[in-house]
Image (cartoon, helix red, strand yellow):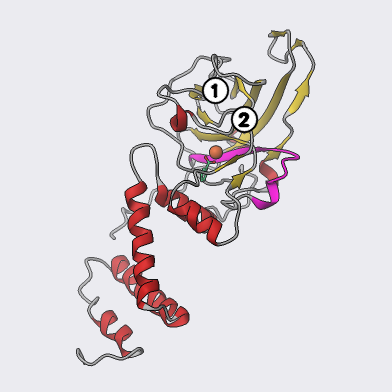
């Protein structure tokens, strides 16, 4: 029947139109979307005004996006959707470093850096030495792995939020022993950008916008899954209430405070600094699948 639909038959009417979807996957996804969306609407029974407000909210999320601001990623992250997708795609438990959200502040055009380089040479803050290694588990240390890093400053801002130039980010390569090191400034916990519709949503839901202090890493090596993760600062008060639900115990490490002296990389420090060390383990790449047909 294609007319006179009621609150129940409207769902089957839409599902019946999906038979000629371009692929089996497109049909499966579309059917699930319609079923869940209709069930959601029957569950909340919105007024016309509430439904218009929902459409206005999504419209404003889109309008807030530009090349520096990705409000849809914020929406996905704050609703836990990003971490759910992450969990579904990383079900293995074989000793590889755990993953977490990419977030909206990764930028493709990041500087390639030399070993030990300072990625925040003219940013005020507590000096921080980051050292680490990349291994393939049983495959041993991975030489030539690419190690991308990015993080906020001590006031909680990324370069893309308040600067025109790229800083506190860079791409390093591991040495023959799979090691890398760099200097930067210590980040801090920070609120995600909350001056847009996602911020309005958080405050309407009675939630704060904070993430615990962390440094982002994206690590890639041939033959291995690219690892997207962070290393969080042990002791941060927001570890148990990250607004994007991204914290995992295995990703919490000591940001160790040191008095002036010779740092572990041999640098003579005349003021206090912080040292973080983390050893990453990559997951061997899954065998290639045939291209998705959606
Ligand atoms: C971040 O850590 O950069 C981030 C992640 C999710 C939402 C906002 C920021
Ligand atoms: Fe971040």
Q: Determine the residue positioned at 38% across, 66% down.
A: 54
Label 1, secondary structure: give it. Answer: loop
Q: Residues within 10 Å of mark 1 (few under 14, many from 20)?
A: many
Place residue 151 in its image quadrant: top right
Q: Position of residue 290 (x, y in %)?
A: 33, 54
| Most foreground residue, 171 or 260 | 260
Disc 2 versus disc 1: nearer the observer: 2
Which residue shows up at 56% across the image and 19% down it?
123
Q: Residues within 10 Å of mark 2 (few under 14, many from 20)?
A: many
Q: Is residue 181 above or below residue 206?
A: above
Q: Which residue is mark 1?
A: 174
Dot placed on the residue nearer the N-terminal end, 2 or 1? 1
Q: Is residue 89 magenta?
A: no
Q: Nearer the viewer, residue 214 or 93?
A: 214
- Name the spot of residue 255 as percent of width and height, x first: 72, 30
> What residue range appears in magenta?
226-241
Q: What's the distance in space between the residues labelled 2 and 1, CA to CA?
A: 23 Å
- According to the image, label 2 marks what residue? 187
Q: Is residue 84 left or right of residue 241?
A: left
For the N terminus, the quadrant is bottom left
């Amino acid at each position: 029947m294609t007319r006179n639909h009621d609150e129940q038959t409207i769902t089957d009417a839409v599902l019946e139109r999906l038979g000629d979807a371009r692929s089996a996957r497109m049909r499966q996804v579309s059917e699930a979307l319609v079923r869940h969306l209709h069930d959601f609407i029957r569950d909340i029974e919105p007024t016309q005004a509430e439904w218009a407000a929902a459409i206005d909210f999504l419209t404003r999320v889109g309008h807030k996006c530009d090349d520096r601001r990705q409000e849809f990623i914020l929406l996905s992250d704050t609703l836990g959707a990003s971490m759910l997708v992450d969990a579904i795609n990383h079900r293995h438990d074989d000793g590889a470093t755990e993953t977490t959200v990419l977030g909206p502040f990764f930028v493709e055009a990041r500087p390639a850096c030399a070993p030990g380089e300072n990625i925040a040479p003219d940013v005020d803050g507590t000096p921080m030495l980051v050292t680490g290694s990349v291994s393939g588990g049983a495959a041993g240390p991975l030489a030539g792995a690419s190690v991308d890093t990015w993080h906020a400053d001590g006031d909680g801002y990324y370069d893309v939020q308040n600067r025109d130039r790229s800083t506190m980010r860079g791409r390093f390569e591991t040495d023959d022993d799979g090691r890398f090191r760099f200097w930067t400034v210590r980040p801090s916990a920070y609120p995600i950008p909350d001056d847009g519709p996602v911020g309005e949503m958080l405050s309407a839901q009675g939630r704060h916008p904070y993430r615990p202090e962390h440094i982002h890493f994206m690590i890639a090596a041939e033959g291995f899954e690219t690892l997207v993760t962070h290393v969080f600062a042990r002791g941060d008060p927001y570890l148990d209430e990250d607004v994007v639900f991204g914290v995992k115990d295995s990703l919490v490490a000591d940001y160790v405070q040191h008095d002036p002296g010779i740092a572990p990389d041999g640098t003579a420090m005349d003021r206090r600094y912080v040292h973080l060390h983390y050893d990453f383990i990559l997951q061997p790449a899954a065998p290639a699948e045939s291209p998705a047909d959606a």
